[in-house]
Each structure stands twice: as structure tokens, then as C-alpha cells.
Amino acid sequence: MADDCLFCKIIAGEIPSTKVYEDDTTYAFKDINPKAKVHVLIVPKQHCANAAELANSDPAELAHIVEIAQSIADKEFHGAYRLIFNTGKDAGQSVFHVHAHVLTGETMEE
Ligand code: AMP
Ligand code: ZN
């Protein structure tokens, strides 16, 4: 666990969250400030800063995150979803523990 990482604390249960999915390597929970009818964050339990670092250190985990996103969208909205990895402060990343935003549950504007 990285010091002072919000998502490490959520994974450890030190900060409450609404769980959507969990397995040995990965945790998914509802975003506290949803930008779509269904807005879920998927995170690896192992701390890692961003998607490119995860692609380098554990590509299978990155693929696993995509599979989980697909299964959430299959359940919520006939398999349609938007998958976003904000990377870097100037692109809107505010938590430096890699997380996939899954936006689904409704028709999205372009
Ligand atoms: P990003 O801006 O891409 O780093 O995304 C961080 C996301 O975490 C934002 O969409 C926030 O709404 C969300 N967030 C921040 N704190 C919490 C929390 N305690 N529980 C759930 N989501 C959170
Ligand atoms: Zn972390």
C-alpha cells in the first residue's frame, strides 16, 4: 500500500465505498461524483500510478480491467460503455492510483 493513497485506503476498507465487483487482484466501486447514470471505478489492488505503468508492469491486469468493464456494461447497458483513464494532472487525473472510469447505463453524447 502506498502512503497517503486514497484508493489504497478504499481497497483496504479504511475509507468506505460502494463495492460493485471484487476478486483477488481487482476492486470496483461507485464513483462518489457520478458523471453518468452508472459510473464505476475499477482499480488494481496493487498500487500503480497510471495506465501506462500498469501496461508495463502487469499487462494481464490491464486486460482484466477491460474485461470487468465489459461485464459491468453487459449487465447495465447491453454492453455499451465509455472507458477512461485520465493520465497526468493536466488531463484531469486527481488520484495517482490507476483507475478505469466506466461510464454506462444510458446513451452517451459524442
Ligand atoms: P480522476 O480525476 O481521473 O483521478 O478520478 C478520480 C475519481 O475519484 C473522481 O471521479 C472522483 O469523483 C472519485 N472519487 C474521489 N474520492 C472518492 C471516494 N471516496 N469514493 C469514490 N470515488 C471517489
Ligand atoms: Zn494506491
Image: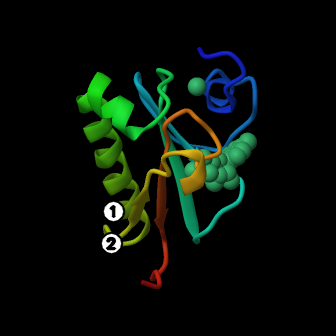
In the image, is 42 to the left or to the right of 17?
Answer: left
Q: Quadrant of ligand 2?
A: top right
Q: Secondary structure at mark 2?
A: loop
Quickly name the residue at label 1: 74
Q: Is the shortest distance between ligand 1 and the CB of mark 1 under 8 Å?
A: no
- 72 or 87: nearer the viewer: 87
Q: Is the shortest distance between ligand 1 and the CB of mark 2 under 8 Å?
A: no
Which residue is at a point 54% across and 55% down the rendered structure image? Answer: 91
Quadrant placement of the C terminus? bottom left
Q: Where does the image place residue 30, in percent across and percent down from the top left?
A: 61, 51
- Identify residue type, mark 2: His
Q: Is residue 30 visible?
A: no
Which residue is at a point 53% across and 48% down the rendered structure image? Answer: 41
Q: Where does the image place residue 83, in percent across and percent down from the top left?
A: 40, 59
Above or below, 11 relative to 16: above
CA distance separating discs 1 and 2:
5 Å
Q: Quadrant of residue 19?
A: top right
Q: Residue furthest front?
A: 90
Dot 1 and dot 2 residues touching (CB under 8 Å): yes
The local crowd at label 2, few if under 14, some if 14 to 19, many if 20 or more residues have their Cα within 10 Å, is few
Q: Where does the image place residue 26, in percent across and percent down from the top left?
A: 43, 31
Quickly name the residue at label 2: 78
Q: Secondary structure at mark 1?
A: helix
Q: Is residue 61 visible?
A: yes
The local crowd at label 1, few if under 14, some if 14 to 19, many if 20 or more residues have their Cα within 10 Å, is some
- Identify residue type, mark 1: Asp
Which residue is at a point 32% across and 56% down the rendered structure image? Answer: 70
Q: Where does the image place residue 23, in percent across and percent down from the top left?
A: 42, 28
Q: Quadrant of residue 6?
A: top right
In the image, is 46 to the left or to the right of 7?
Answer: left
Above or below, 72 relative to 49: below
Return the mark for residue 11. none
